[in-house]
Image (cartoon, grey):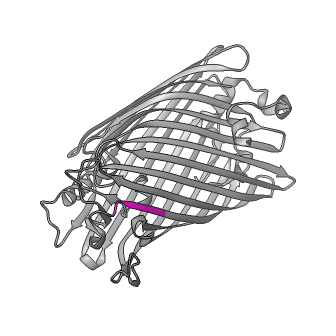
Amino acid sequence: MLCLVLLLGGVSESLRAEPVGDSLTLFQREMLRASPAEQRPAAGFMNPAAEAFRQSFSLSELAVGYADSRRGEAALAQEGTGANGFGFEACSFIRTSERGRAFGTAGYTYGTRRDVRWSETSDFALLYPYVTADSVGGSLTAECYRFSGGYAHTTGTWTWGAVLDYRALLEYREVDPRPRNVVSDLQGSVAAARRVGNEYALSLAARGRKYGQRGDVAFYNEMYQAAIYHMTGLGMDYVRFAGVQTGSYYAGWGAGGTVELFPTAKQGFSAAVGYDYFTFRKEITGLNNLPLVTVADHAVRGVAGYRGRSAGLAWGVTARGELRRRSGTEHIFGDPVGNVYPEITTSEGYASQVVGGTVSGVVGNVPTAPLVWWVEPEFSYVDFRSEYASAGRRMDVLRWQTTVRGGVMRRWERWLVRAEAGITCSARGNGRLELPGADFSSSRIGTLEANYRYLTDAMTGVWLSARVERRLSGERSVFVRGGWGEEWYRASGAAPRWSAAVGFAF
């Protein structure tokens, strides 16, 4: 109920009784929120207690829009060659009192993922490589609902907070093969922070996750039914259950925590380290929920940064790092008794490791003047290694990328204009792909090779966006925004995208 009240803007006047932050004009609040110089130098973790220090004013937005992307070969085949669709989004941050902050979001999208190959399972990035697949594929229609709500409150030297986030996804196809996937994804976090001196707070956050996906692939053509494969990574599949076992269920859960030190006034040193564990089990529903594979994913992330101000300029630098390891354990079964397969042993299958790092900076003027500008350079790398040891297969990819983005905002009495642009470059990545014993004439191996070419391809990309806003009576406004971007890959071709939206702010 709290989430719905926040997102629809149905906040009583008693909740807005504190005038300090909300005495700012709407355009002043928007410029403060949009400027990177005013954003909390956070770690990117789910830490609801830190939301109490994000901003001292209320601000809400409602928007509806349309987006389209066409990636062609410049994409992972399991994610599709592009997507299009329309959506609705709402976000709200309410200063309920001097010490309380309530925040929430809601969204709905309806669209199509084009030409998805070798995966009939949703959320490939979360469940890879253990997806249900066939050699036909096709476009998928998707509907996604998302809701979140949280609250943070300060009491003396302590601040506490909690947040819940729920995502529901329905994805399907209306021609053979006809997958139907239903996803339920619930995440939550609780946190407490204690002031350390006059300028800093030390926080501890704990989070949990419950995930489920039920999928089934149907065929209406009585003359032909494509074989269904249960992929296990690097072109391998669970051969014993290939063919007609079309139903699957993914049952997952996760837990994690973060320790974070941050400045309460957004200036100074900040640092955080966090750990997350996620595991899921894939079951074959047509065989009494036979547990096919169990996956364990461990991730450690850290960040450190500094924000400062001098001579009317705000500046900062941040360094981030991540180590993630994933391993799959395949369950081996004996001969069935009736429709029950006894498990006789397990086998270590696919394993991967990701090491990534980013160094970024920001410089801009302090957002008090009618004109605000900022520039953000960034340099990042990612080292991805995966193997299927028993088959001697492996794929390694090492990429470096440089990005520069910038923006400017200008306000007049009734108008606010915002423009942003960026450019990113990546040289051809280093890597290797070893597939002993593979049939290189097969579709699945051709798809794997295409994915490898994309992941190691040289790329240059640019993007532009603009937003024009006009204030209405009172502290309300209407806006239109649009964006365009394109990436050019040396071997995989171009990947253009664009989006447009209209909305209200208050």
Q: Nearer the viewer, residue 309 or 97?
A: 97
Relative to 348, does residue 243 appear above or below in the rendering? above
Whether 40 is among the magenta residues is no
| Residue 293 visible somewhere in the drawing | no
Relative to 404, does residue 204 appear above or below in the rendering? below
| Residue 399 in which image quadrant | bottom left
**Predominant SS along the magenta part:** strand
Q: Nearer the viewer, residue 208 or 456?
A: 208
Query: Picture coordinates of residue 6 (x, y %)?
Result: 71, 36
Q: Nearer the viewer, residue 296 or 25?
A: 296
| Residue 74 in which image quadrant | top left
| Residue 77 visible somewhere in the drawing | yes
Query: Picture coordinates of residue 66 (x, y %)?
Result: 45, 29
In the image, farthest residue toward the left: 441
Residue at the image point whose x is 31% and y is 64% from the top: 231
In the image, farthest residue toward the bottom: 344
Residue at the image point whose x is 63% and y is 36% from the top: 91
Relative to 154, does residue 467 appear above or below in the rendering? above
Quarter of the picture containing the C terminus is top right
Q: What span is in magenta? A: 245-250
Query: Picture coordinates of residue 239 (x, y %)?
Result: 26, 71
